[in-house]
Image: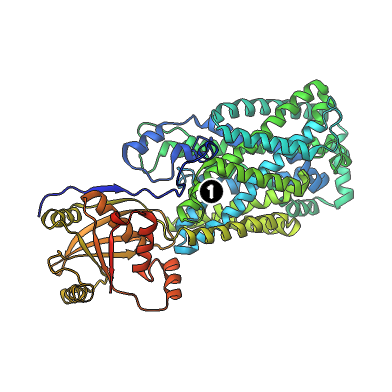
Amino acid sequence: MPDVSPTSTQILIAKGTGGRESAVRRWLFAQQETGSTEAVEGTGDGTGGEQASRHRKGSHWFRVMCLTGVDYFSTLGYQPAIAALAAGLLSPFATIVLVLLTLFGALPVYRKVAGKSFRGEGSISIMEHLLPWWTGKLFVLVMLGFAATDFIITITLSAADASAHLIFNPLVSGLDGGAVIITLILIAILGAVFLAGFREAIGIAVALVLTYLVLNIVVIGVGIVHVVEHPTLIPDWWAALLTQHGNPIMMVAIALLVFPKLALGMSGFETGVAVMPQVRGENDDPASVPVKRIAGTKKLLTTAALTMSVLLISSSFVTTLLIPQQEFQPGGQANGRALAFLAHEYLGNGFGTVYDISTILILWFAGASAMAGLLNLVPRYLPRYGMAPQWAALSRPLVIVFTSIAFIITLIFQANVDAQAGAYATGVLVLMTSASLAAALIARRQRKRAQLWGFSIITTVFVYTTAVNIIERPDGVRIAAVFIGAIIVVSLISRVQRSFQLRSKTVTFDTAAAGFLFADADSTGVIALIAHEPHGSSDNAEYQKKSRDERRLNNMPASSPRLFIEVTVSDSSEFLEDLLVEGTVRAGNRVLEVTSSAVPNALAAVLLAIRNEYGVIPDIYFDWSEGRPLTNMARFLITGAGEVAPVTREVLRQAEPNTARRPRLHVS
């Protein structure tokens, strides 16, 4: 046998555009950078120097913290007001409970997730790999529904709160009642920016976050000074608490009950792991586990959590003591803008306007962070599962879809910040519950008993918090249910429609397989494959019988060399894949072995790769499968097998319209 090196052939999946394209269509379906982590890291595993070089790129973890901080820190624009509306005078106690859950619950969980998510996959990907077969795919679809709820509501709620800061600014007049219009304009501008291409996101984020944090520290500091200068404020507040709730034990109990309503104050953790590919590693970072990148991300998460915890407690304290409770109610001057109220009240309208502008910008940019998260998340999963049209892997069509959905959500909620808080918190809490469960399962696999118990307790707390939030404010589940239902329906329809597509990105022949094919093409000019169902116990008699049947029933020429091909189904829930064709000799018979998620699609890809690589149009010989056609089709869609011959022919027909160049199928 000749010494033939392994070969690899790229299989191009047809785009289905056909003919001439308009300029609008070319622009719409062109890929461009959007600021998402996908552009930085890609979706493949990556090995060797290429992946290592990626780890060395990126930015310092502090700068990347500002990128996730536009989502996390911007909640200060509305969190104190929402906390006061939900917990009243107990807001500081409920906020302390939230901070404890942040530091001793969410932070350890996401530090654990960061160790397994250095490509920005997040907890969803971890659970996908921990759950087998279609179970993992269904879980991902459900989690994508909640993630879409989280990110879409981030866009709409942030824009709505930005419009509230603009409308209530005393230097602006004539905008009363225009919250919906202003919110829609802000969302439209956001969509337009992403359609044009989103660059320099980190530099903008650093400037916005640092300015916003400094302004908030000034406002909170002035508020604390005012509280100190008026020593009766704290006793009056405490007396009012005793009058309302009776004793400190009852206060703590009520704070534990109401703190789930404040859960959107933990919104930045999922974004924190999503931006991991932006964190710069070091030259000596291993390609498989970039230790320095992971360490930088853990610093990012810890610093953000500590900073936000201090700001949450202090802001809740000063706003509760200094702002009358009626101002937090709908229509009040502090509704959705408690710190802005203090900025105008104690530092004047000039400083207050600067604070409003900073808040509007960072809230708008929080929507940008959420849009980037969506553009990173959806293409990572649905196209890879075959559960979305191919354009779902491109940025501009997705931007149009997400912007349209944000318009609808804004109109449904009439740009009301309080009304959207429940939906936002639901998305955040479900993702955190998923992350804590993933952390517990990782600890179990690593046989770390103490961590397992700790993460299990955290998971239980998040389950409770999520359940309370859903019962109190079911809007989040309703919106998520709509997203989940739409995703599942679209995914199933797309999977069926794309079931006859080529699924293989590349086909690689190992040395033995390449030797078999080269020998047949060189000696006879014919490559004839016999499709054989793999059996671990196949012996020479079975291969001989299969060969005789094909020559007798399928008129396979006696001069054609005999080469069997066997496809073993691995995980039929997968869609896109790279195929490896391995050659072996079993019981004296030459066999090509392939592992794939679907038998017909793999056979079609191998046949086309043989034609392209060896310049011979191959023949393949099949037996008809037994069973009913509908049953076989269902088996193909679910298990990747079923009626192989006609499906292989259909895949080839769609992939190669030229019949003269199409591999030939023979069925008996």
Q: Quadrant of residue 184?
A: top right
Whether residue 93 is situated above or below residue 321 in the rendered picture: below
Q: Name the one closer to the observer, 600 or 663.
A: 663
Left/right of residue 210 with respect to residue 563 in the rendered view: right
Q: Residue at x 46, y 31 (%)?
A: 58
Quadrant location of the N terminus in the rendered image: bottom left
Q: In x, y percent, where is residue 430?
A: 62, 54
Residue 312 seen anywhere in this rendered image of the structure: no
Q: Residue at x 86, y 28 (%)?
A: 173
Furthest residue in direction bottom, as rendered: 627
Q: In x, y percent, where is residue 659?
A: 32, 57
Left/right of residue 181 with respect to residue 391 in the rendered view: right
Q: In x, y percent, where is residue 308?
A: 65, 37
Whether residue 510 is situated above or below residue 534 in the rendered picture: above
Residue 445 seen anywhere in this rendered image of the structure: yes
Q: Which residue was labeled with disc 1?
A: 378
Q: In x, y percent, where is residue 595?
A: 31, 60
Quadrant location of the C terminus in the rendered image: bottom left
Q: Amino acid at mark 1?
A: Val
